[in-house]
Amino acid sequence: MDQWRSFRNGLLSSPRFQKFAVDFPPFRPVSRSRSRQLFDLLAGFTYSQVLYCTVKLGLIEMLEGQPLSTNAIAARIGWPADRTERLLKAAISLKILERTSIGDVTLGIHGAALAGNPWIARFITHHSLLYADLADPIGVLSGTKKDNQLKDFWSYGDQRNAADYTALMAASQEAVAAEILASYDFSRHRHLIDIGGSNGTFLKAAAARYPQLKLSLFDLPKVAEIARANLGNRFEIHGGSFLDDELPKGPDVATLIRIAHDHDDASVKTLLAAVARMLPPGGTLILAEPLSGLAATAPVADAYFGLYFAAMGQGRTRNPDEIRRMAKDAGFASVEVVATRNPVVSGMLRLTMP
């Protein structure tokens, strides 16, 4: 494989071969495709900014079920028609929007998908923080840039943004909860605790599917207050830090949903050890988050989340073997990958106590 890779790279970097590939009709489609992919890497940031503007200006809601002319859209957003047309053309090229048969503008395939998943729009507007940090991507990746807006937003330690980050996580939690509940059967358990459970969106979904299941939530004190107001009396709510406090005994299954990848290795080891101490013999931990090491999700797990966590100042995505090693050290007997319907939304591991 290494020999092939060396041969391939020498060929692709050769100006003579590049000219041959364009000139030779059977190779021309491949050459065009590779050129487009390379340019997409170059232009990707501008694509994300077109998406951001489309969402931020409310065009998805504006055009849902109601095609409008360029002039009508310009009037609604308060832009000159020529400036509006520039944005519309860009969004149309990316299939966020489309032209109707009479030249009006309506939703494209990506815009329609956004309309059906409004939580994605919330994350898109949140990304203004990430975009600001990535004005210095080398500083973010090298760790020399310290004053990152994402790091300030996800201030778990002092919880000053607890309401904001809880609302942001809750916006996407329904999609993640649906993926988890479709991929794992909790009916074999009697008591579930969601560790780092935010406002309780996952527990609400679990309660609807498993009415006999006892349900608990553990999160930081300020977040626990939000969960208590959101969930009601059926649920046990515990406030504390899973890095400093003991987890409440009793549950035979725990969930960590998009928690481990927010933390560095030392914290994850501490967390897994705390969960292992809490669970009874044969107890189960379901860990759900984007997993590294999978070709289908590599751009999401390793490129997107790689830079996001670098700007956040902590955390990283891990492959199953990395988590397996930490889990064994924490006292778990086995770690297995659980297939999910859509790994882009969430991957899943089942960790079992001896």
Image (cartoon, helix red, strand yellow):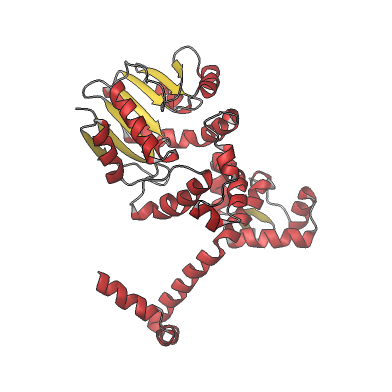
Q: Residue at x 75, y 60 (%)?
A: 83
Q: Residue at x 30, y 72 (%)?
A: 5
- The single residue placed furthest to the front in the displayed view is 144
Q: Quadrant of residue 108?
A: bottom right
- Is 349 positioned to the left or the right of 96 in the image? left
Q: In the depicted view, which residue is nearer to us: 334 or 141?
A: 141
Where residue 279 appears, as percent x and y from the top left, is: 28, 22
Q: Residue at x 77, y 52 (%)?
A: 72
Where residue 265 appears, as percent x and y from the top left, is: 37, 40
Q: Residue at x 29, y 23 (%)?
A: 277
Tell me, yes or no, if residue 63 can be seen here. Answer: no
- Is 135 positioned to the left or the right of 280 in the image? right
Where residue 240 appears, as percent x and y from the top left, is: 46, 21
Q: Give the vertical position of 165 relative to 220 (above or below).
A: below
Where residue 216 appears, as percent x and y from the top left, is: 40, 19
Q: In the depicted view, which residue is nearer to us: 182 or 124?
A: 124
Q: Quadrant of residue 95?
A: bottom right
Quadrant containing the C terminus is top left
Tell me, yes or no, if residue 264 can be seen here. Answer: yes
- Please state the total of marks drawn on the protein image: 0
Q: Give the vertical position of 154 relative to 240 (above or below).
A: below
Q: Give the vertical position of 151 relative to 240 (above or below).
A: below
Quadrant containing the N terminus is bottom left
Q: Give the vertical position of 41 relative to 120 (above or below).
A: below
- Is 40 positioned to the left or the right of 103 in the image? left
